[in-house]
Image: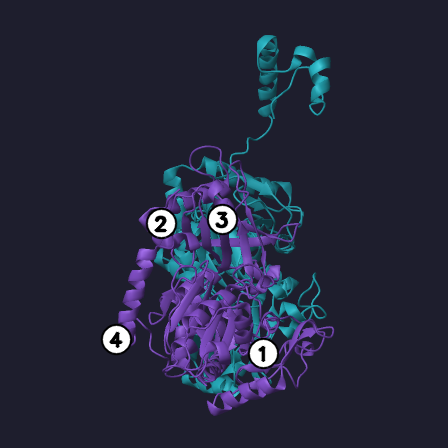
Chain colours: A cyan, B purple
């Protein structure tokens, strides 16, 4: 805001100001000398505040081209990451491309390694240098499980009007936003030692699934404005017209009723992620509140150089199950131990391990609110992050001029992980429509995230 | 301002100021030659089974994303029909002639002249609407200074939450200053909404970056794009009809591929089937067969392109004169009174997840054929209609003779809500009318559902009824 005068003239009383303050209005004539003084005073105060330098206006053409490339690669990744298993596989794949090997006993400094736990969680590592296990780990913890609609174990039934699939909810979300949109079915099951993966609804020409809604003509008595779908049992999906025809079609794809009972069967939004707007500067896609940071952290780690501490990305597959699951604390603890063991060249004693933990710092992906295009979001309030931990994170971002917003988080993830005796700060990207089947993330925020996380992993 | 030739071509469909008598005569001549040679080479052949019909139907849905586009697609897909400008062309036609009347590019009447005189025996009319509920983009208030979003208001009865968090395309028309008609097709751009405005509209993201030069905000980036593609400026956008539609094409739904899932099936389903039935009539029908594709049903059927429009009377008067009859008011009323009509519209199918809004014995089921519903309305007969038993019986016997399955149904349980159809607009003209149509599940949503087998049955039934 432009200063009006050296004297106190309430700006709202413009008319009064004209008369009472006389020549006090800045800009020209006799007042200009005084205005300059005022400006200097304002400048000296400005030094006390950070200048906000965020947004597309700060981005030059070369950077914009890099941002566009990042967004396109991320869009491709999202298309391959519709289930936790597939997300982990895609991220591990890209980390292998950067030279990673399965985590083994002895690894040299700077070696990239990965470990996929039986539950589908994974840890990606860059082994540290001279520090040994006691140097601890600098890591990002990110979840890979979006909200979704699961099939019940015996899902198929014949209704009067059509064949339907019984569903159950995974995660907490507004049910109505899942109605009347094309959904794809992802099935995963084990036949003996062989895993079977089947997708219906992603390939062009494949049929999709739809959860119907009651027509607006007839909705008055059964839907309220606040909760259009009050009962989760109203979320069954169309499978076809007749159950017999559906079973026949499933058999043609090599699937029996018994398979459905055993399978992990998830309905998620069908179709690839995409860029939104005439300027294609937003990414629309499924589960971005989770997957964006998982992707960016993996990409940052793939480009990281070895430091004294081990560097790690911990990918958690069942973050939405309950509070313990929400933190993924069980797996994060084991992953950190494995990282330190790799760092220490094998079994390490408890004292070394505790020292390593005490020196460990985590950024924990959370769902905090922030303004798009204004930088990454740190959410220390929800879990009362210690100022020292917060400062370490802030400085890492400042170092590469990534703007940071302090936002409100939902988080108890960071505080739960903190009880491992590690520093943990909740981090997120600004997501529009968080929790909806398709969410938006700005390409600029992806760029901020990648720069910031690369700095987090830098020596 | 006088439009140049290319502009004139764009304006041609049904816009009264775009008519060129010389070209109309040439077209007439051409159509006559084509008629003499038999079916036009460009005509898509009649579908041989339900799958072939479903494929043609999906193409109709994908190409006809607005009422005007559906009309244009149907008109272009009917090369055997002679385009008539009822305002100019001299009335003349003989039995078996196929005629097409288009008004303002938003409504079309397909006529196959019958063996019996219209004046004495009336017509067999199927009327169905090609407009559909969707958000309409408001482009009349785009400003330069930092405006981030546009708004979209409702065309027809939509639930706003259906339109959040999904990829949308913008399609429609802008009439620029000076009268240039621009078909806007932004199907390669994704528009998005993630919130409602306090006024109950949708806030629409068109772009998020500022323009490269100057202080302008994201909305200005959108205008810049329209300028780059179409030469449009913000003041041009004040006269626009731009709809936001789901970006997804029509798709098969269900593992058994038995359903079609797409926006706009209320009621491009029955209008497609009626149009296709008219196209595939073999030889001159007994009565003059008329299929009217209508606009503005979802907003009350008013205006020059809706079912209340006297455009139908203009067409009938032209046809009466063409058969040498006087086109007096009395003659017109007699012809209308002798006409029987199907108001082809979509009742809601029984919804498995919401059974209590239906009365189980009367709710139409998917896959049981088109539903014949002789009554509509709520709280008694508010906004409703009631058909004569004689007509109901004759329609049922036509369908039976064609071997086309049908069911008897209603719109929903009595007073669970309800809706109306265009039946009353025909009843008001003294035309005997009954509602019939394939049922649609998740009616008025971005992904409405129909059963392929219902489409097939309705198509054969409509064709048989028109021919008899």
Secondary structure of the residue carrying numbered label 2:
helix
- C-beta proximity under 8 Å, tags 4 and 2: no
Say which residue label 4 marks: B37
Please state which of residues B246 and B439 is positioned toward the viewer in this rendering: B439
Please state which of residues B96 and A82 is positioned toward the viewer in this rendering: B96
Q: Earlier in the sequence, mark 3 or mark 1?
A: 3
| Vertical side of A139 occupied by A397: above or below | above
Say which residue label 2 marks: B7
Spatial separation of the CA atoms under disc 4 and disc 3:
50 Å
Spatial separation of the CA atoms under disc 1 and disc 4:
37 Å
Residue at image point 59% right, 29% down = A49
Label 3 and label 1 in one chain: yes
Query: Splitting the image into 4 quarters, where does residue B429 fall?
Result: bottom right
Say which residue label 3 marks: B206
Instruction: Pinpoint residue B161: horizontal percent, then vertical percent.
Output: 61, 60
Which residue is outermost to the top? A30
Residue at image point 30% right, 73% down = B35
| Vertical side of A391 occupied by B192: above or below | below
Say which residue label 1 marks: B432
| Quadrant location of the C terminus of chain A in the rendered image | top left
Secondary structure of the residue carrying numbered label 4:
helix
Spatial separation of the CA atoms under disc 3 and disc 1:
47 Å
Viewed as shown, does residue A275 lie left or right of B41? right
Q: Earlier in the sequence, mark 4 or mark 2?
A: 2
- How would you rate the neighbour count of disc 3 (Cα within 10 Å): few for under 14, some for 14-19, many for 20 or more? many
- C-beta proximity under 8 Å, tags 3 and 1: no
Foreground mark, 3 or 1, reads 1
- How would you rate the neighbour count of disc 4 (Cα within 10 Å): few for under 14, some for 14-19, many for 20 or more? few
Label 1 and label 4 in one chain: yes
Instruction: Pinpoint residue B373: horizontal percent, then vertical percent.
Output: 61, 80
Secondary structure of the residue carrying numbered label 3:
loop
């Amino acid at each position: 805001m432009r200063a009006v005068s050296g004297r106190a003239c309430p700006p709202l009383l413009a008319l009064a100001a004209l008369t009472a303050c006389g020549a006090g209005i800045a800009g020209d004539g006799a007042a200009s000398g005084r205005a300059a003084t005022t400006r200097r005073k304002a400048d000296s105060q400005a030094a006390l505040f950070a200048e906000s330098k965020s947004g597309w206006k700060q981005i030059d053409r070369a950077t914009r081209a890099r941002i566009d490339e990042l967004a396109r690669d991320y869009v491709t990744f999202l298309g391959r990451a519709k289930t936790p298993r597939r997300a982990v596989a895609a991220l591990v794949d890209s980390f292998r491309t950067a030279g990673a090997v399965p985590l083994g006993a002895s690894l040299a400094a700077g070696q990239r390694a990965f470990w996929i736990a039986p539950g589908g969680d994974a840890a990606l590592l860059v082994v540290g240098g001279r520090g040994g296990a006691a140097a601890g780990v600098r890591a990002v913890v990110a979840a890979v499980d979006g909200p979704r609609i699961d099939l019940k174990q015996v899902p198929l039934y014949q209704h009067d009007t059509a064949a339907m699939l019984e569903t159950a909810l995974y995660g907490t979300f507004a049910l109505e936003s899942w109605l009347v949109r094309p959904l794809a079915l992802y099935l995963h099951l084990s036949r003996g030692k062989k895993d079977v993966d089947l997708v219906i609804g992603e390939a062009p020409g494949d049929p999709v699934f739809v959860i119907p809604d009651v027509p607006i003509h007839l909705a008055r008595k059964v839907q309220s404005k606040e909760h259009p779908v009050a009962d989760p049992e109203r979320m069954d999906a169309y499978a076809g017209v007749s159950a017999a025809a559906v079973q026949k079609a499933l058999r043609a794809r090599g699937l029996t009723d018994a398979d459905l009972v055993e399978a992990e069967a998830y309905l998620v939004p069908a179709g690839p992620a995409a860029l939104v707007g005439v300027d294609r500067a937003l990414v629309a896609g499924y589960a971005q509140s989770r997957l964006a940071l998982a992707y960016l952290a993996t990409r940052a780690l793939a480009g990281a150089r070895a430091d004294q501490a081990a560097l790690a990305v911990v990918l958690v597959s069942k973050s939405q199950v309950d509070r313990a699951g929400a933190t993924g604390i069980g797996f994060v603890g084991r992953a950190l131990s494995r990282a330190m063991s790799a760092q220490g060249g094998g079994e390490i004693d408890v004292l070394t391990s505790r020292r390593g933990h005490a020196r460990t710092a985590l950024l924990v992906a959370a769902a905090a609110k922030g303004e798009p295009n204004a930088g990454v979001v740190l959410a220390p309030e929800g879990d009362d992050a210690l100022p020292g931990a917060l400062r370490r994170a802030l400085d890492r971002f400042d170092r590469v001029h990534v703007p940071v917003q302090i936002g409100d988080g939902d988080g108890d993830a960071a505080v739960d992980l903190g009880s491992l005796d590690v520093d943990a700060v909740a981090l997120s990207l600004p997501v529009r429509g968080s929790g909806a089947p398709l969410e938006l993330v700005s390409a600029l925020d992806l760029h901020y995230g990648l720069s910031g996380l690369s700095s987090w992993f830098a020596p | 301002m006088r439009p140049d030739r290319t502009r004139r071509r764009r304006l041609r469909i049904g816009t009264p100021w775009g008519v060129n008598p010389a070209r109309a005569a040439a077209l007439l001549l051409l159509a006559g030659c084509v008629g003499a040679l038999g079916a036009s080479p460009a005509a898509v052949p009649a579908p041989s089974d339900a799958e072939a019909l479903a494929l043609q139907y999906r193409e109709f849905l994908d190409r006809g994303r607005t009422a005007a586009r559906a009309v244009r697609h149907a008109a272009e897909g009917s090369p055997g029909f002679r385009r008539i400008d009822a305002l100019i062309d001299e009335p003349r036609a003989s039995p078996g002639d196929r005629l097409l009347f288009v008004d303002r590019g938003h409504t079309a009447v397909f006529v196959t002249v019958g063996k019996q005189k219209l004046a004495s025996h009336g017509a067999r009319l199927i009327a169905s609407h090609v407009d559909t509920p969707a958000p309409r983009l408001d482009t009349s208030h785009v400003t330069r200074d930092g405006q981030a979003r546009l708004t979209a208001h409702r065309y027809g009865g939509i639930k706003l939450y259906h339109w959040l968090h999904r990829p949308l395309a913008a399609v429609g028309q802008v009439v620029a200053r000076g009268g240039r008609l621009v078909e806007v097709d932004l199907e390669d751009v994704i528009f998005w909404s993630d919130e409602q405005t306090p006024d109950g509209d949708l806030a629409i993201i068109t772009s998020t970056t500022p323009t490269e030069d100057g202080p302008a905000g994201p909305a200005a980036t959108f205008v810049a794009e329209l300028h780059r593609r179409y030469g449009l400026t913000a003041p041009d956008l004040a006269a626009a009809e731009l709809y936001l539609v789901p970006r997804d094409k029509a798709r098969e739904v269900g593992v058994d591929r038995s359903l079609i899932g797409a926006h706009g099936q209320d009621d491009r389903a029955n209008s497609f089937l009626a149009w296709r039935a008219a196209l595939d009539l073999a030889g001159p029908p007994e009565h003059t067969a008329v299929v009217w594709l209508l606009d503005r049903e979802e907003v009350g059927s008013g205006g020059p392109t809706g079912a209340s429009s006297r455009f139908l009377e203009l067409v009938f008067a032209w046809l009466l004169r063409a058969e040498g009859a006087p086109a007096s008011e009395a003659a017109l009323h007699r012809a209308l009174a002798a006409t029987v009509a199907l108001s082809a519209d979509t009742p809601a199918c029984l919804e498995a997840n919401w059974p209590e809004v239906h009365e189980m014995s009367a709710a139409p089921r998917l896959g049981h054929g088109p539903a014949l519903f002789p009554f509509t309305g709520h709280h008694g007969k508010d906004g409703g209609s009631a058909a004569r038993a004689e007509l109901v019986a004759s329609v049922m016997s036509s369908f039976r003779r064609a071997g086309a399955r049908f069911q008897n149904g209603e719109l929903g349980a009595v007073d669970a809500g309800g809706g109306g159809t265009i039946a009353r607009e025909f009843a008001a003209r003294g035309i005997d009318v009954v509602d019939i149509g394939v049922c649609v599940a998740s009616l008025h949503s971005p992904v409405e559902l129909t059963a392929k087998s219902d489409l097939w049955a309705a198509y054969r039934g409509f064709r048989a009824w028109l021919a008899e």
